[in-house]
Amino acid sequence: MITELAALVAGKLPARDDEGQGLAEYALILALIAIVAIIALIFLGSQISDKLSTVGKAI
């Protein structure tokens, strides 16, 4: 790592710009999880509501 840093400072290696790539990947994963959660709530929302209502009445 020190040799890479020294070579970068000396100008022998081009600067890597992959910091934004990692952030974009995390944003895509977060968006995918949000979409899956929304779809699950749409399809299972009434069933979950019925179960929670039953539990609420039992308490």
Image (cartoon, rainbow, N blue to C red):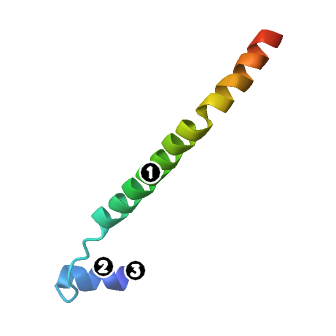
Residue under the point 41% across and 50% down: 31
Nearest to the observer: residue 19 or residue 41: 41
Give the quadrant of residue 17: bottom left
Query: Circle 2 sits in a helix, a strand or a loop, which is it?
Result: helix
Residue under the point 38% across and 62% down: 25
Crowdedness near tag 1: few (<14), some (14–19) or many (≥20) residues, C-alpha within 10 Å: few
Residue pointed to by mark 2: 5
Residue pointed to by mark 3: 1
Residue pointed to by mark 1: 30
Q: Do the residues bearing badges 2 and 1 touch, measured as CB atoms within 8 Å?
A: no
Residue under the point 40% across and 80% down: 1
Q: How many labels does the image show?
A: 3
Give the quadrant of residue 49: top right
**Alpha carbons under labels 1 and 3: distance apart:** 31 Å
Three-letter amino acid code at disc 1?
A: Leu
Query: Circle 1 sits in a helix, a strand or a loop, which is it?
Result: helix
* The furthest residue to the right: 58
